Image: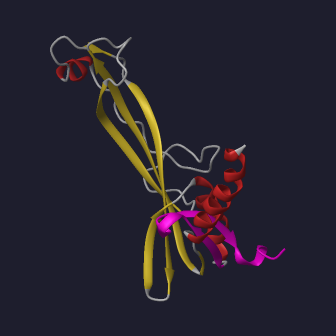
């Protein structure tokens, strides 16, 4: 029973801490980017079946920098179902390249094509400009608001190190 009485006060403290560590700002100067990357990777291990953390080697990569939803130069695939453009596939590593990175007594996995996306948002308030990591939802809100330069309210994450939410100012009170 003692633990149950302690739980509500702990939840209140955590909520207060979370709310106090986030900031809201309004900006008219912003852009969002999504760096889409293809990378060929191969796993190496003494026993690929039982190895918990095999060594991973990255071979050829290719990237496309999506900016505000516009088709980036060199992008050939897209937009996909998330509104992102992708680069040309990098060349698959040859058997010689894969075997060339093998260490003594290691087994070699099959080359696998990895897809990653890194989201960032830049915004300005007065003379200050910042670029922070963000997520797909914020990227999409910027893509929708950017053509009309609609002001956005941004919710920053803990210690103001990321953008967690973006909302059109004209839709906040509706």
Residue 161 part of the magenta segment: yes
Q: Is residue 147 above or below residue 95?
A: below
Please tell me which residue is depicted at 52% across the width and 59% down the height of the picture: 134
Q: Which residue lies furthest to the bottom in this view?
A: 126
Along the line of sight, the residue nearer the viewer: 172 or 73: 172
In the rendering, at what x and y percent does residue 99 appear?
21, 17
Q: Is residue 34 above or below residue 115?
A: below
* The image quarter in which residue 30 lies: bottom right
Please tell me which residue is depicted at 41% across the width and 36% down the height of the picture: 89
The type of colouring in the image is: secondary structure
Q: Which residue lies furthest to the left in this view?
A: 104
Q: Can residue 11 be seen in this view?
A: yes
Viewed as shown, does residue 30 lie left or right of 56? Answer: right
- If the image is split into quadrants, where does the N terminus sit? top right
Q: Is residue 142 visible?
A: no
Along the line of sight, the residue nearer the viewer: 4 or 77: 4
Viewed as shown, does residue 88 lie left or right of 102? Answer: right
Viewed as shown, does residue 121 lie left or right of 56? Answer: right
In the rendering, at what x and y percent does residue 18 appear?
59, 63
Please report the bounds of the magenta region as a residue range. 151-174
Q: In this view, does 38 lie above or below 15?
A: above
* The image quarter in which residue 13 lies: bottom right
* The image quarter in which residue 145 lies: bottom right
């Amino acid at each position: 029973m003692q633990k149950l009485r302690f739980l509500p006060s702990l939840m209140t403290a955590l909520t207060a801490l979370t709310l106090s560590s986030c900031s809201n700002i309004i900006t008219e100067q912003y852009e969002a980017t999504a760096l889409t990357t293809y990378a060929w990777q191969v796993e190496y291990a003494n026993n690929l079946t039982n190895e918990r953390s095999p060594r991973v080697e990255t071979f050829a990569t290719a990237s496309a920098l999506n900016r505000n939803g516009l088709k980036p130069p060199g992008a050939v695939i897209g937009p996909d179902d998330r509104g992102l453009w992708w680069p040309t596939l990098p060349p698959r590593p040859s058997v010689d390249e894969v075997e060339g990175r093998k260490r003594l007594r290691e087994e070699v996995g099959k080359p696998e094509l990895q897809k990653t996306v890194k989201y960032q948002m830049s915004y300005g308030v007065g003379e200050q400009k910042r670029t922070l990591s963000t997520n797909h939802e914020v990227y999409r809100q910027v893509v929708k608001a950017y053509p009309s330069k609609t002001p956005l309210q941004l919710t920053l994450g803990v210690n103001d190190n990321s953008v967690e939410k973006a909302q059109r100012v004209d839709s906040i009170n509706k």
